Amino acid sequence: MSWQNDMENTLQASSFTPELNIRNQKVNYIQKGEGAPILLVHGIAASLHDWDELVPVLAQNGYSVYALDLLGHGKSGKPKVRSYQAEWLFEHFAGWIDSLNLTQPPILCGHSLGGYLSLEYARRFPSRTRGLILSNPYYRLGQLSALLRLSYHRPHLNGLIVEKTPHWMFRMIIDATSLAMGRTSGADHALPEKVRHQTTVDYKRTAPGVYNLPNTVTDLSPHLSQIDLPTLVIWGNRDLTLAPVSFPPLVETMPRAQGKVIHGAGHVPHQSNPVEYNQMVMEFLEGFKSGSVSS
């Protein structure tokens, strides 16, 4: 078996990967551990493997952990349309949660676009949500730099470029970006080798129409004050994708939010600084057990 396949099965070896057909689109996900449910939601052009470092920690500490591949990502369904809509992902995501038949509301943990979906789910279904953990969350278009906003205004071109770019070139770009960020925990690269490998795999297998998603999200800014749930917001202060200055206002606006900064980290602190990130998550979750945080 190749190393790539080993990476693909990292979490499946001691778990399972059910495939459901929701709204005629497959959902690929993993489940591990027993206890209170926590759902992990990745960002754009990623997969459930974003959470390889967090899943075992949560499972070992008494949680039932679920992580999915969003519509158009990983091994989940990929409708053959040129321009994906955020509402499609939300319906796919919400349908998947319904299919799990959970006996208690879950805590949602989302990164970037996954943060948007988690916030939107909590906004629409507050009684079905116990709390939120948001990592560099995307909640409005203005968080993107002018260059990225311009890029996402041409989703067909973005999709074509991704389709035509060879695997080795993508890997070179990811390695160069990781080196430029660099020196995380004393290493030359911000991202470990296995993460850079998986990131390349995930980019190449993402449906091209996904790159239209940032243009179709609802600006959640006017709704944040209504999301009255225990919330932890974690971000890297060197995020080059979403403006770091956009995260403190989110924390200040949400009634029960607290913010944590991982200094030196970029857009994916859960992958670049997993030890520090996981500790912050576990400290937040301990509040639910001790009663200092009420649902």
Image: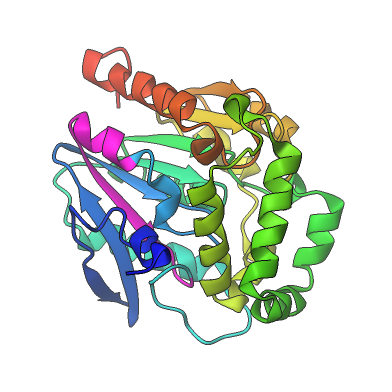
112 sits left or right of 214 in the view? left
262 sits left or right of 130 in the view? right
Range covered by the magenta-colored residues? 55-72
Residue 168 x %, y %: 65, 69
Position above or below: 54 against 277: below
Residue 1 x %, y %: 32, 69
Look at 17% across and 50% down and name the residue there. 102
Look at 45% across and 59% down and name the residue there. 47
Look at 29% across and 33% down and name the residue there. 57
Residue 10 x %, y %: 31, 54
Report if residue 242 is visible in the image. Answer: no
Report if residue 115 is visible in the image. Answer: yes
Q: Quadrant of residue 234?
A: top right
Q: Check the picture and name the quadrant holding the C terminus.
A: top left
Q: Is 243 part of what is drawn in magenta?
A: no
Look at 67% across and 55% down and name the residue there. 174
165 sits left or right of 100 in the view? right
